[in-house]
């Protein structure tokens, strides 16, 4: 489990600490300028895998472009395809929990049901690779989904924070979950129209069985961000400054 993170108020000057000096920064960009941004970071994130159809292809593409990404995995799928989970680790990808059973009614039946499901996901992946980055999780449907009872969802989020677990949403949505299979051009349009709005982008993608068009779009998504000067990182590589940016941007731990 991660050590407790103490958040420091951010201002637009260089703050000096006894041990750490860092520069704070603004969180929302002025708009999609279409020009290269310096010191920009993009976190590509993939939900709902692993799948036999698409995850290995995605790993090959990421490897070819020398890109690290983050996979929020479904524990049941991980148990079916343990070799793919091992391959993720070998490729230096961040592997984080999504859920064990991607059935919203089961997962969100109660706070206890959610905790049981999450722990089962962590245990399954842990048996495969020895550990899992459970500092970050992604709630099925996101942290403000309309599926879970509001009171239950609030209790789930409080419990996660009390256990020093951060829940992660996104600020760029590729839209590949809008239907079983979204047209590649539609996915790219979602990225091109505002994908570089934020200095630190967290992109929502999926690697489930049906997401073949996500695989087709991925090289162009990577090239898009590279052309704008973004550095690709996984959540295992996130700095304190990046974490605080995403807190303030309401991508992490959205209330």
Image (cartoon, helix red, strand yellow):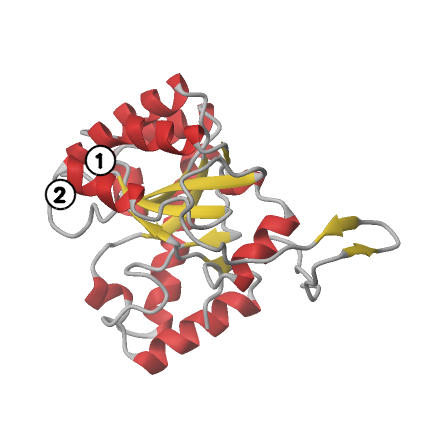
Instruction: Determine which residue is flagged by label 2.
Output: 182
In depth, the one of 188 and 143 nearer the eye is 188
- Left or right: 243 in relation to 136: right
At x 45% / y 67%, what residue is drawn?
254
Q: Which mark is residue 214?
A: 1
In depth, the one of 50 and 183 nearer the eye is 183
In depth, the one of 249 and 164 nearer the eye is 249
- Left or right: 140 in relation to 44: left
Q: Which mark is residue 151?
A: none
Q: Residue furthest top?
A: 64
Specify the quadrant of the image occupied by residue 176. top left
At x 70% / y 59%, what residue is drawn?
12
Which type of secondary structure does the marked residue at label 1 adopt?
helix
Q: Residue furthest right?
A: 18
- Nearer-N-terminus badge (1/2): 2
Q: Is residue 244 visible?
A: yes
- Left or right: 183 in relation to 153: left
Residue 17 drawn at (x, y percent)? 84, 55
In three-dimensional space, the C-alpha distance between marks 1 and 2, rounded to whole angstroms, equals 8 Å
Residue 88 drawn at (x, y percent)? 40, 29
């Amino acid at each position: 489990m991660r050590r407790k993170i103490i958040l420091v108020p951010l201002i637009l000057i260089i703050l000096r600490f006894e041990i750490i000096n860092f520069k704070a920064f603004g969180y929302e960009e002025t708009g999609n300028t279409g020009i290269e941004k310096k010191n920009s970071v993009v976190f590509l994130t993939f939900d709902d895998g692993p799948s036999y159809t698409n995850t290995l292809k995605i790993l090959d593409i990421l490897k070819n472009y020398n890109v690290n990404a983050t996979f929020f995995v479904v524990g049941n799928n991980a148990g079916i395809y343990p070799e793919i989970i091992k391959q993720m680790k070998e490729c230096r990808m961040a592997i984080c929990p999504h859920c064990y059973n991607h059935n919203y009614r089961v997962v969100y039946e109660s706070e206890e049901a959610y905790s049981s499901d999450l722990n089962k996901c962590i245990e399954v992946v842990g048996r495969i690779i020895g550990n899992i980055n459970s500092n970050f999780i992604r709630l099925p449907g996101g942290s403000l989904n309309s599926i879970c009872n509001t009171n239950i969802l609030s209790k789930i989020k409080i419990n996660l924070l009390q256990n020093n677990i951060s829940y992660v949403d996104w600020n760029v949505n590729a839209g590949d979950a809008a239907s079983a299979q979204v047209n590649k051009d539609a996915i790219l349009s979602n990225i091109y129209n505002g994908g570089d709005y934020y200095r630190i982008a967290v992109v929502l993608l999926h690697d489930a069985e049906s997401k073949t068009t996500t695989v087709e779009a991925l090289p162009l998504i990577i090239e898009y961000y590279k052309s704008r000067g973004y550095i690709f990182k996984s959540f295992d590589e996130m700095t304190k400054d990046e974490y605080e940016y995403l807190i303030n941007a309401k991508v992490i731990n959205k209330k």
